[in-house]
Image: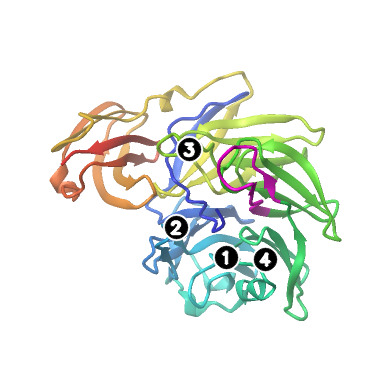
Amino acid sequence: MKKLHFTLLLLSILFCRISYAQVSMEVVAAGLRGPIGIELDSAGNLWIAESGSGQNDGAISVIWADGTQERVIENLPSTLDTILMETLGPDRIQHFNDRYFGVIMSGGIPEVGGSILVFERDSITQGGTPLSLNHAANSFNMEKRVLSLGFAESHGFSFVHDGSDMYIADAAADALLHRDGLTGVINIFATFPKIPNPLPFGPPVSDAVPTRIIKNPTGGFYVSQLTGFPFLDGASKVYAVDPQGQLSVVDSGLTLITDLALAPDGDGLIALQFANFRGDSMPPYVIGSAILQQLHSDGSRDTIAAGFGPSAGMAVADVNTFYVSNLFFGTVIKISLTTTAAESINKNNQSSLKVFPNPVDETLNLSWNQPKAGEVNLRIITVDGKTVAEQKLGWFNSGPQLMSLDRSKLGVEKIANQVLVVGLISDSMVYSSMIVLEK
């Protein structure tokens, strides 16, 4: 597993379980095309990188501080890797400063693959005309340089802007890159060791797959890692990298970490576990197994939130407020901790979606509990994340719901003997359920 959509196989946020606080969950962005990296700016606007659907429809969206959702850059390159069945497009949006921001493009895309596209912040205004690739003020290509150094592939996934220099986590090269701000030359700054595979199958070692790099306030950087196949529980680490590129382990025994941030209370780090991997399950990335946790400076660890995801991107607003992206159902969820009392679950989000009969013949009967009144949208996807049907279901009051849908009107009448996932999305929930379509 090298190209870093990590074959993100599923799915939606079902419910949330907290070790020390009650949680409320709210869908703050929907209708997104493969959202991965997300970032809050200094004004409280939430920026979202949409990888697209493989039809040159990558995008950058913003949820403005007033709650308005808007695409501000459209028609960015987005292609489908037909071998790995992964969508390659914009992975992450990060601000250099108040004047410029960068969009990291997946490796393997013609012309701009493995590049950071630079846009001027002032060129984007709320309610203005969306920009396109042609509006980029500059671009830095990493992939060509990394391949020239003898690496088989390159996939920059995050960066740190340090003065005029840049440090980039390359998830495919298992390395940190350094780009000199004066010369533009890119060199290898640090490499990450492969991980021994103790299982009797798979390769003898797994790839390190560094994901998020952030600044260490005392000097150097922190870097999280995902780890490659067989995606072992407990194999991921968080590293400290000093200014000379030397590695030391900050925390270990973690699983599939895709995002990292400084803890807002000043005590250590916040780490996002994408999911647990189980090769004998369907999907293999277990639904509801993402974890948001605090890695304390003294080496202890607390779970902030669990039971959601899989989730690839995170933004931290304050000690009680977090955002996570949901790749295949196209949402961003706001997680708010509302009390420090020992509560186990937000009961409004406990009930999941039921679809019957299952296997499905001609009619899909949907049963769910609507936490609060609102619009509900339906999305049906394959287990590898491809959307096969979407439909607006309308407005629903709070409480138990029952709805029947004609399979032929959803456009899935020709799909037979295939496992799919049905998702319902509103501003108060994302529910999902697996189904099998009969002939």
Q: Residue at x 25, y 47 (%)?
A: 392
Quadrant housing residue 68: bottom left
**Which residue is label 3 attached to?**
279
**Relative to the observer, which residue lies in front, 162 or 395?**
162
- Precedes in sequence: disc 4 or disc 2: 2
Q: Position of residue 327 (x, y in %)?
A: 45, 49
Q: Please state which amino acid type lies under the numbered disc 3.
A: Gly
In depth, the one of 55 and 384 nearer the eye is 384
- Gap in angstroms between the C-alphas marked 2 and 3: 17 Å
- How far separated are the C-alphas under marks 4 and 1? 12 Å
Q: Hey, which quadrant is residue 138 in on the image?
A: bottom right
Task: Tell whether label 1 touches label 3 (CB within 8 Å).
Answer: no
Magenta part of the chain: 194-212
Mark 4: amino acid: Phe
Comparing marks 1 and 2, which lies closer to the viewer? Answer: 2
The answer to which of marks 2 and 3 sits earlier in the sequence is 2
The 10 Å Cα crowd at callout 2, few under 14, some 14 to 19, many 20 or more, is few
Q: Which residue is mark 4?
A: 96
The quarter of the picture where the C terminus appears is top left
Question: Mark 4 or 2, which is nearer the eye?
Answer: 2
Is 276 located above or below residue 136 in the figure? above
Residue 196 within the magenta-colored segment of the rendering:
yes
**Vertical order, 25 against 153 (above or below):** above
Image disc number at residue 104: 1
In the rendered image, which residue does mark 2 sit on?
84
SS under mark 3:
loop
Give SS at disc 1: strand
Give the dominant element type of the magenta stretch: helix, strand or loop. Answer: loop
